[in-house]
Image (cartoon, grey):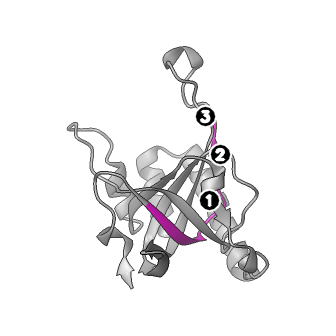
Amino acid sequence: ADHILRYAQPEPAACELQLTLLDVPTVDRETLPDFATAWPDEPRSRFQAEVDGLKQQGEFVPCSGKLLVSVTGELPAWEAGQKIIAQGMLRELTPPRNPGEYNFAEAMRRQQIYAALFCESPEAAQLQPHTASHTPVFGQTLNQLRYGILQVLQQTLPAEQAAAAAALLL
């Protein structure tokens, strides 16, 4: 199967993907105060996923790799291991343009994540109904534990140390 990076470019491109959730979606709320922006900040749901397929000419073809998924709005209570179909804008994670700025793309590359998918609404990411009840319990529990530990690390350690500790969890 082709790696998702083959299709991801620095400029966003529309696509539809079959994904397997690697962690529980989290919701980021109001990152900026209302007075700091002309447009109110909407909550965003974020999670990591493994790519299973990419829609080309009306059919899903096998594809692989991990990516970040960001959805405008709040998603239902999904669990790691569930399969979804998501429509959005796929783009390669690129290094910062300003010298000395934090290199988010490099931090993600250490986790073998090279691309991101941006979905405009929760309706753009839908659970595949026939796989909703087939989540392996052991794998799901491990992913929930990993996610909980990552949250604690990010909240208690400086960013660089948290990234190093997170890499050890893989």
Q: Which residue is mark 3?
A: 42
| Residue at far right of view | 133
Magenta region: which residues? 15-29
Q: Residues within 10 Å of mark 1 (few under 14, many from 20)?
A: many
Q: Earlier in the sequence, mark 3 or mark 2?
A: 2
Residue in front for this viewpoint, 115 or 161: 115
Q: CA distance from mark 3 to mark 1?
A: 17 Å
Would you place residue 135 above or below residue 77 in this image?
Answer: below
* Mark 1 vs 2: CB contact within 8 A: no
The answer to whether one can see residue 22 in this image is: yes
Q: Which residue is mark 2?
A: 27
The answer to whether one can see residue 170 in this image is: no
| Residue at far front of view | 57
The kind of residue tagged 3 is Glu
Would you place residue 80 above or below residue 92 in this image?
Answer: below
The kind of residue tagged 1 is Ala
Q: Earlier in the sequence, mark 3 or mark 1?
A: 3
Q: Which residue is mark 1?
A: 125
Which image quadrant is residue 62 in? bottom left
Q: Depth-wise, is mark 1 or mark 2 nearer the camera?
A: 1
Could you tell me which residue is drawn at 49 percent across and 20 percent down?
A: 37
- Give coordinates of residue 53: x percent, y percent: 49, 77
